[in-house]
Image (cartoon, helix red, strand yellow):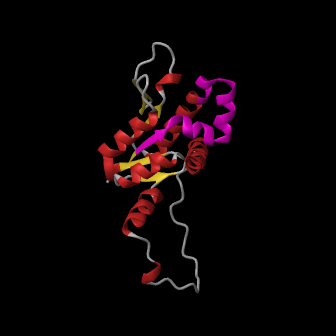
Amino acid sequence: MAIHLIVDGYNLIRQSPQLQELDLEDLQLGREALLEQLTAYKKLKGYPITVVFDGTHALPGAQSRDRIRGVEIRFSRMGELADTVIKRMAAREREKALVVSSDGDVKRYARQQGAATIEAADFADKLLQAAYMDLKGAEEDESRGWKPTTRKKGPRRRLSKRQRRNNQRLSKL
């Protein structure tokens, strides 16, 4: 099953220290830097990515939809929040969606619809790793090897089906 990343744009920018510095300098610089990181991530992983921004901060005359190097960009309509657009997309995509946001309401709604969620700060770390891998031209090492342990794991410690499915999708990032 393919994963569709739905990114809360300004939320991710403000959760990433590197992007936040650019955002404080100029809003457009923060957006451009985020798009560069997302394209590097898409190049490495190949997942479809949609980044959603609030339309109130859009450039004058900007389209509500655009595509830059394979990353779809959406601006919400005037008077509509990006959270509403993200919720609508999560409801449509359901199990295929992975929502990147630190907004509790958005994450709760996405989980109710069956979508996986990840904190924006955690995903920002993954974007930095992808940028590093893109620079080095290396592939991410999937095998971490077996580590011996005496810790017992039994059925009573098993996560719920929803949490296992969420963890499985997150492991593909």
In-front residue for pair 2/60: 60
Query: Residue at image x 51%, y 49%?
Result: 104
Magenta stretch, residue numbers: 5-30
Q: Tell me if I can see residue 31 in this picture.
A: yes
* Among the 4 quarters of the image, the one containing residue 166: bottom left
Q: Tell me if I can see residue 3 in this picture.
A: no
State which quarter of the image contains the N terminus.
bottom left
In-front residue for pair 98/3: 98
Taking 166 as reference, is 87 above or below it? above
Q: Position of residue 121 (x, y in %)?
A: 60, 48
Query: Residue at image x 59%, y 37%?
Result: 13
Along the horizontal axis of the image, is 96 left or right of 147? left
Q: Position of residue 9 (x, y in %)?
A: 51, 35
Does residue 31 show up magenta in the picture? Answer: no
Q: Main secondary structure of the magenta part?
A: helix
Q: Position of residue 19 (x, y in %)?
A: 64, 35
In-front residue for pair 140/165: 165
Query: Residue at image x 35%, y 55%?
Result: 114
* Among the 4 quarters of the image, the one containing residue 144: bottom right
